[in-house]
Image: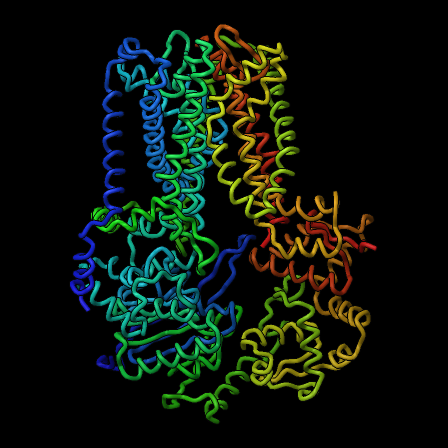
Amino acid sequence: MLDQPEGSSLVDMRSVCRSFSKGSGEDLLVLEKVDLTIHSGKIVGLLGRSGSGKSTLLRIIAGLIAPSSGDARCRGETIKGPPNGVAMVFQSFALFPWLTVLQNVELGLEALGIDATERRTRALAAIDLIGLDGFESAYPKELSGGMRQRVGFARALVVHPDLLLMDEPFSALDVLTAETLRTDLVDLWIEGRLPIKSVLMVTHNIEEAVLMCDRILVFSSNPGRVAAEIKVDLPHPRHRLDPAFRQLVDSIYARMTQRPELKTPAVEGIHGTGVGMILQHVSSNVLSGLIETLAAPPYDGRADLPVLAGHLQLEADEIFHFGESLQLLRFAQLSEGDLVLTEAGQRFAHLETDDRKKLFAEHLINHVPVMGLIRRVLDERPSHTAPAARFRNELEDYMAEDQADETLKTIVSWGRYAELFAYDEQSELFSLENPH
Amino acid sequence: MTLQEILTPRLGQALRPNIWDAVALILVIGAMVLIVYGGEETTLPLSTLDVTPVSLDPTNLPHYALRTTMRMLLAIVCSIIFTFVYAALAAKSRRAEMVLIPLLDILQSVPILGFLTFTVVFFLNLFPGRVFGAELACVFAIFTSQAWNMTFSMYQSIRNVPKDLEEASQSFHLSGWQRFWRLDVPFAMPGLIWNTMMSMSGGWFFVVASEAITVGSTTVTLPGIGSYVALAIEKQNLRAIGYAVLTMLLVIIAYDQLLFRPLVAWADKFRFEQTASGDAPESWMLDLFRRTRALRTLTYPFAALNKAVSNLQVALPAFPRVPAGKGPPSRIADALWLALIAVSTGYAGWKAYSYLSATLGPADVFSTLGYGFVTLMRVIVLIALATLIWVPVGVWIGLRPRLAERIQPLAQFLAAFPANLAFPVFVVIIVRYGLNPNIWLSPLMILGTQWYILFNVIAGASAFPSDLREAAGSFHLKGWRWWIKVILPGIFPYYITGAITASGGSWNASIVAEVASWGDIHLTATGLGAYIARATEAGDFPRVVLGIAVMCMLVTLFNRLLWRPLYAFGERRLRLG
């Protein structure tokens, strides 16, 4: 497994960009000038928020999508279509439900035209290695999530890839199952029993990255860039409670919440400014609950993000997301891996329902420009109604269609809670009338 | 472990036959003999039809049933082949899709018996003097009643293949050909089989209607249950009609039990779901087959063949859907393609116009439109009536699971039963009591298709969540309020599915339902169906074309303006879970 010299690289990416076309004809940049080299013998992690383009990067390496510009090479050859010697494990497992475990594992070998006897031998060996013995003839729907992902691993390992790509392979599993699978995989890797040379995994779970990877590339969002590279020298097996481990996790949290030098009122993670601000939906219930939790002991207005995430049993990605929504509404601040309640947030925590709505409405109008716009349009029109299409078109000038959908959904949900306006889903009409 | 170790012990055991083998073997061989026997007769000269005319002797019925069934079987095979080619082409090539999908949409609304008028002449000329030509015309009519919805289902499945499976097959280097057989086809299988079943149900109606047909001076009477009934009508023999109905019942039951139930049960493994859920469909026939040891080994070569076919290194022309990162598809090629479509459409339109305008004037168009609206009114009134009757009945049955379990197969069966076999019974009544054919022939249009409403409503009511029923009960919702607020919204999507099928079927049935006869008594109701039927009998092709065009237009408009919006509304707002 380590027979290749350090110098020869498996994957070489030079200033790779990728954009997707938006509805309005302009392009949305998802990856900006990414450089990445992967050598043999390492587990490399791509860590970032959802939507930071790390999955896109993985798919470029897998040959599933082409870069818009830049140079992507696998073993010195430009990547055109899935390269040989690269196999992938999917977040959703991507097993064929009409094939048995054995048939699923054999699929990749069949495509390579390997003869039946060898196919069977290798498939059984992979099934054996990954701990699926006895399940050969089961169909995926008969298996638990953990067993299914084991099939996903076996299917990838059986082709003996040089590079194993993993796209959030544990995030669809429950906590215990994910942990078992992680340690099993790391053990096999350490013992050199995996027929692969290196691994590239995408994750948004900070602890997972620290637990498994030798190198972590931290991605920033909008557009995706490699913001930092962290070497993890902790010896295996690593323990989550080890102080060195905790320190590393904390420092990554801090790095990911660091506010960049702001030229605009944009908030990290929330893309765009003014009316073109992309909103991601968070229920007002969740926001209220989070504010209450922050205001109450033991946090008393300031919480360490990893601790808060652990307490609320949230993924790092989710807690960032909620924190950013609070920050956008100026109910809280994210800084150095902490979430700090603002004065308005403190006030909110101690108000009754109706007063909370008023305060929420005030903050929406002041800090979310599109809310102000909708309210102004409704006030000015004699009918006090406006079709959603009017705002959707405006949003789509700045963002992709699905982002506009999400933003509109957020607008409707927050606006309803704040009683700023009513919305009729049937006619897609905003209005000032509330049913009495 | 090696390959040998796994297979040897199982193979050794597998070869020893058991009792089930005997049963299954007889079934298989019997089927083969019947197919050969039925097939031999189709190559005979056309004159044999006159030498050995259809007779009302009930002992001939098994033979007629066999011929009818063979036609069905042949048509379904053609439909499946057509489906694979057409759907794959439409799903994989953007340019083909532009033409093929709207075309399919229109073809779906063309009255099937209208096709027959042209194809009988065409196929008879293709095989002059052979029974085979007439057989093909009949098979083609059945094909047109089956293929479109199967193709739609397959096309939609291929377009909706889950993205992760698509990426997996790409990243594991499956070729386009392998991908089609390993991913697209299995994924499309459950929908395809369900639609094939629905098509079969509809097909019986048309096989019966198209066996005895007169187009102008050409009269073809193919031996089959349909011709038998046609003769019984001519001879005013009610008893013979009873025999025919009975035979049809048995044939449909056999078809369902021996072919479709096993297929559905088998296809269950293709259902795309990650968790095992609910009751899997069962089939005694499939169980029988699975229990047989020796017979199962007979299927191994088929499995091997399937594997070999799907692994063939066929270099398909790659039809990438908007290749990633390679810019938008060529504008010039698109423009050329669109120009080509426009030119051919213009040419076809001009040809059709000059053909029709040679004999028909604007007055014909208006009168045909008038007939169209009469038939449209009939369809609307009948669907409304059927709704008023079957929705309450369906809800009542559907909320009683044990009753629903027994009634549901019956309703499905009634939907498959070719209602035109029972038409004479109604005609006799109309004649005897001197009823007005304009009113009393109408119910025939919905005789066969009303069951779609019933069984869909039953399915909807059975699927209605019990917690919602309990909630309604605990809030004392009763009477009309319960119907309006609780159950009707709950079954709405199901009802719409049933009503769409029923209304489509009624349009088709109008061609045979608006004209009926009993011996030498001929009843005619005013309407588009009667118009087309009369024109067909007279061999008046321009009027047939005009009638079909008007019907096509009305059906399409009816679908677009009423059913589709309702369906979309139901899916968006009222779909539970």
When the figure is inspected, residue A271 is found, relative to residue B331, above or below; the finding is below
When the figure is inspected, residue A359 is found, relative to residue B135, above or below; the finding is below
Quadrant containing the C terminus of chain B in the rendered view: bottom right
**Residue B22 in view, yes or no:** yes
When the figure is inspected, residue B419 is found, relative to residue A117, above or below; the finding is above
Instruction: Tell whether B187 sits left or right of A10.
Output: right
Seen from this angle, which residue lies furthest bottom?
A243
Quadrant containing the N terminus of chain B in the rendered view: bottom left
User: Residue B262: which quarter of the image?
Assistant: top left
- Give how far across and how far down residue A40 sits, in percent: 29, 78
- Give how far across and how far down residue A359 sits, in percent: 78, 71
Residue occupying the point 66% across, 44% down = B488
- Give how far across and how far down residue B430 sits, in percent: 59, 13
Instruction: Tell whether B155 sits left or right of A135.
Output: right
Name the one closer to the observer, A56 or B413: B413
Residue occupying the point 23% across, 51% down = B293
Name the one closer to the observer, B519 or A25: B519
- How many numbered badges does the structure rendering display? 0
- Give how far across and how far down residue A196 sits, in percent: 27, 74
Instruction: Tell whether B200 sits left or right of B452.
Output: left
Q: How is the image coloured?
A: rainbow
